[in-house]
Image (tube, rainbow, N blue to C red):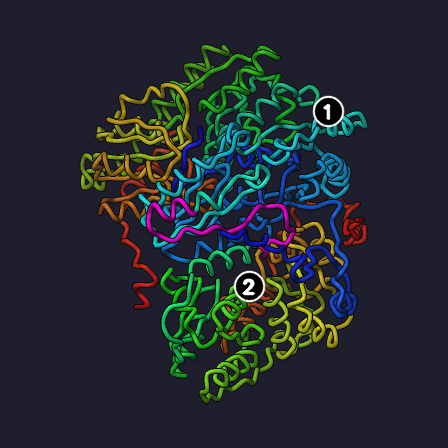
Amino acid sequence: MSRPLVGFHDGCALHGALATVAAIEGVTPLVHSTPGCALRGAFATAGAQGFRGAPIHLSPISSTNLAEKHIVFGGASRLREQIKNTLSVLPRGLLVVITGCPTEMIGDDVPAMVREAVTQGESVIDVGAAGFLGSAHGGYERVLAALAARVDELRLPAAPAAPGLVNIFGVVPRYDETWASDLDEISRLLAAVGLVANPIFGPGGGLSSLAALPKAVASLVLSPWGLAPAEALKAKAGVPIVAVEGLPVGADAVQDLLRRLAAATSLIDDAAVERLLISERRFEDFALDETLLALSRLGRRRVAIAGNSVIAGPIARFLVTNLGWDGRALVLTDEPTGDSGLSAFAGRVISTADGAAVKAAIRDAEPDFLIAGARYGALAGELAIPFAPIADLGGRAALSGGFTGARGVARLLAALTAAQTPVVETKRAAARA
Amino acid sequence: MARRSRLLPRETRLGALGARLADAEAVAADFAGDDLPQKRIRTFSEAAHDDLSVALHVLGLVEDLGLVVHGPRGCAVGADAPLERIAVTDLDQRDTVLGAGDALARALLRLDETAGPAALVVLGSPVVAINNDEIRAVVAEVADQIGKPVVWARTDGFRSHIAATGADAAADALLNLIGAPEGEREPDLVNVLTCWTGAAVDDFVAALDSLGLRVNLLPAGAHVADLRRAARASASVVLDPDGLDALASGLAERFGVPVLETPPPVGPMATATALTGLADLVGREIHVDGSSPPIESLRSRRVVLAGPSAFAFALSDLVEEAGGEVVGLTVPHLDRSHAQNLARFSARRPRAQIHVGEAQGFELANVLQRLAPDVVVGSADAVAAALRLGVPAARLDPAAVIGVPGARALAKAVDDALAGAALAARLARSSARYSAGWLRRSPDWHVKLEVK
């Protein structure tokens, strides 16, 4: 039974699938649904523009924009037409047809339309990601699991040999706001110990990244959402899975991640690991020294943290185990299922995408410091406590806001020590009065 | 209660077109006769907006209105309104089979409890429209239960291909919130209907203040109580006709509030016309200098303008008054309400290209590379498309050019675009977003007359 969500800000399965596909260079999303479905998701991850025009941060999104007649009589022929014309208007690569709620409800035979194109030698795949199937993170899981499971059907250009390749799963483009920055830092860390990251998304990924998935020596799973694609690859190509609890925030977490990867791959050079860890610790020490005065001024804080599981849990762990802070509440807004294993780092761990419930959990925890997305700044103002935003609404955090490794810790410390108590915004109407 | 007729889509009500590319003369001819223009469709399209998104945007501007989107969770995202005022029923697969009236009631009650809005609006999604879920009865029941107005904005996501139909649905909902007229007409009260806010709008309001008028600004920044006041106003002036024409005409039809028939007050001349007209309408006197100085950087420049349709025509007047040559307009849709402006524009620039289509970047890129204008001014996506082709461009939001200072805002945008052409040169070196084959084809290749 559905339950109402108040103050919900993430997207649906279709939006997550779309963001995932659009973040892979050379892959074109084709949304088979009514108008509005795709753009609501696109604008949600970029800051709204009053729903005007196209989202300029994304590559073009092909869409059937179904009309009433298609709802009544079926939209399969419209999809056939759109597939054909997409292949002529947009650069060739892989075309991923993502179906929305209306087409799932009316029962269009999407696989048949896709098969037609495939039999003509085109690289096309379909993924069912109706919004009613769940969250944006769930959409990522669906689309990436489908791509991983069917990678040899995709007619991708052969991937060059890459010894020591490690697939990175579990960071959801745009919905995990610091995604590009974190993938970049993970790639740098792995390169330092002789491994090659396969980030799939952003400038380090692309079609060749997809083609290389089965050739990896391991799949590194950073959140529960990466498990399904990793398992699909394990079943298909025997790629072992290394699962960790979120992004490695800080030198200790990097050490743990490398230890687990080393156990799975036996390709890591121990001396290189030691050199990297020394460098990471020195960087973290430097950041702590630089901010110690401000940290001492802040004192030990009773902190509430709200965010997606890939980052919120690791930040809580770092704050408790390295700064000695008191984790009062940890709210996982991507709603992962199962035991998060994070209860040691917060008095209360809850999983909810409901904005009102997030706020209630934060209030109940009576924190004196809040770490959350920028949208919760007003709540900090209301509670009169300092606020450190871990992401912004405009997508800029993707470029430089990651929290991975010692460099991530430096950004975290900078954010903590720069945190201020937001001024509650005066209502425009009150100002007018 | 008698069932009200279905909200008419803009295609039916005003003969709206969402897909068209031709010179101004040909497009003007579409709307010259009594018949509705022939409907055109696309055989390839990029993701477009729907009525639900636009309605969500317009209704979200009323600051104490709670919004409940009845659909899957993704249907409620992307709005500008504060999230605490928005709820979604978050329908799952089971609901799509068995219906979800209970879910709607629960969402309304929960939002009322958490946000305490003055009134609530339910917005329909494609899922509940396909399922034909009962909304009216739930709305009435919850309104009784909580003792507050609850209305239904009749959006569905697919019956109209003109997203502005959502503004009509929003207007219908806002008018229903007003209910029966209360109190006497207020002779010095004027409604300014706008979705836009900012300093230029504030200046325009100040100009009305100087006429001795009290301004009721809505829906941007308004409260539900202001909607009720709107029914007592002596006139309405519309800054954003594409978004709020239906609200203005509804206020006129249901409550007898006359509408000032004038283009948006963009720049000195149009502002003078609007203020003079409004002064006449309410029996005041005003003198506004409507002269528009030439803009040196625009002289003999070939310009493409992009933005909401009525705004784009108003901006084209300002550009031409300032010495520029408008060689193209790209607008989300055209309908009969634009016929007069379109005819006037066509008489002046019959060969200028008019592109009708929102968020259709493939057509825009193709059109712009053929027109090769000196500068593109207007909406964010058109500016991005131009810059990626190496054409200097600058954003100019409608809110920035309202009123007499609009000419200065235009001049600054054009000056900045031309002086900052390095960005266009840099972006033009990035990889192409559309195939070379497409860019060689006619830009209206995928716009076809609909076969009935």
Residue at disc 1, secondary structure? loop
User: Foreground: B80 or A26?
Assistant: B80
Q: Position of residue B207 (x, y in %)?
A: 43, 79
Question: Could you tell me the amino acid type at mark 1?
Answer: Arg
Q: How many marks?
A: 2
Left or right relative to B263: residue A153? right
Write down the region rendered in magenta. B140-165
Left or right: B364 in relation to B262: right
User: Is any part of residue A178 visible from this angle?
Assistant: no
Residue that badge 1 annotates: A155
Residue at image coords 53%, 18%: A230
Residue B183 in picture, x, y percent from top left? 36, 71
* SS at mark 2 in the image: helix
Q: Quadrant of residue B106?
A: top left
Compared with B83, A405 (above or below) is: above
Please identify the residue farthest to the front as the structure is shown: B1
Of labels 1 and 2, the one closer to you = 2
Classify residue A404 by image quadrant: top left
Which one is in front, B448 or A344? Answer: B448
Give the answer, above or below, for where A140 lies relative to A9. above
What is the chain identity of the residue bearing mark 2?
B
Q: Quadrant of residue B370?
A: bottom right
Residue A152 position, x and y percent, is 69, 19
Query: Pointer 2: what residue?
Result: B246
Residue B380 in the figure: left or right of residue B144: right
Picture residue at 38% right of the left edge, 65% below the top: B226
For label 1, the crowd category at 10 Å Cα-Cα, with few meaning under 14, some 14 to 19 and many 20 or more, is some
